[in-house]
Structures are given as structure tokens and as C-alpha cells.
Amino acid sequence: MTVYDAGAVLQPAAEFFVEYSTTIFYRHLSAQTPRVLPSTNFLVLAGILWLCASRSKLDGRHLSWGLGVTGVTALLFVFGSFASMILRLPFINRIYHIDNTFSCVAIVCLLLLAGFGVKAFCRDLETGNFRRSYATVLVTAAALLAFTLPSLPARI
């Protein structure tokens, strides 16, 4: 019997959520093991924060909302504490590296959302909403940093 027959779930701690956007390509989960988690970089985080902070209506078809829901759902599978629920889902409970599998789905959504964020940034520059959006992005980034800093020394 293998782990794929019994069903198991690998998920990183929630503190890794912000670190998901600090390196490009792969993020090592610990120094002791070679496990890595695909990640984006800080520019993707900045684009997504700008998209959330901007009041510019960019998408008449609500594509950004669909991508956002899909991306958040994938990130909840990666970083959430839904191991017991995942183990009850047929087929999904056989995906041992749930973190790696769903983080790849999340990366695609996050890259597209960051593109919408760049578009919102350009529109805010043209319309004069830049200062309000910029302040919101800075406050949100500071809050994410404050959430991550307490757990950082333990992993270094």
C-alpha cells in the first residue's frame, strides 16, 4: 500500500502565503528537506495588490472575478487547513502533493490577475486615482509584511 492508495495531504503553513510572492520559480519549504513549492515574485504581488486597491473598472465581462475566485480557491487548497475535507473528496484525496499541484493552478490565475493590476495601474496614472491606490497598496503590503515577520526567524 502506498501513500497514494491511503490518501494523504501535504500543505505548507499559512505563513508561507506571503513568501509565495517573494521568490521566482521555486521556494524551499525547509532547509532539511528538498521539498519546494512553485512561487511567483513580488511584481505579481504588487500587481494583484494594485488590482484590489484600484477603483478602475477594467473588465466588463468580470473575467478578473472569475480568475480571482479560481485563484483563491486554489490557494485555499494549498495553504488552507482543509486536509480533512480534501481527504474526503474522491480523486482529489489521491493527490499527495496537493500544495504543488494547486499552486501551479494558482500561479496561472495570479499572473493573469497581475496583468489586470498593471492595467489598473496605468489607468490610475491617467485618471488621477494614483495616490489613493498607492496608499492602499502600501498599507496592505505593510500588513502582509507584519503578518509574515514574526514567523521568519524560525525558518531562517
Image (cartoon, helix red, strand yellow):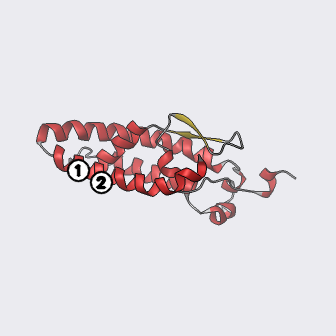
Figure quadrant of residue 33: top right
Mark 1 lies on residue: 135
Task: Measure the C-alpha gap from mark 1 to mark 2.
Answer: 6 Å
For label 1, the SS is helix
Residue projecting furthest to the right: 1
- Between 156 and 88, the one lying in front of the other is 156
What percent of the width, then of the height, locates residue 150? 50, 57
Q: What amino acid is found at the position of numbered circle 2 in the picture?
A: Val
Residue 15 seen anywhere in this rendered image of the structure: no
Residue sitting nearer the eye, 125 or 31:
31
Residue drawn at x 31%, y 41% is: 117
Residue, x 36% and y 40% (percent of image)?
Answer: 114
The reply to whether discs 1 and 2 touch (Cβ–Cβ < 8 Å) is yes
Q: Is residue 49 above or below residue 26?
A: below
Q: Which numbered disc covers residue 139?
A: 2
Work out whether 41 lies above or below 65: above
The residue located at (16%, 38%) in the rendering is 125
Give the secondary structure at mark 2: helix
Q: Against 76, is 30 above or below? A: above
When the figure is inspected, residue 78 is found, relative to residue 46, above or below; the finding is: below
Q: Which mark is residue 111?
A: none
Residue 58, given in percent of the width and then of the height, sits at 24, 44
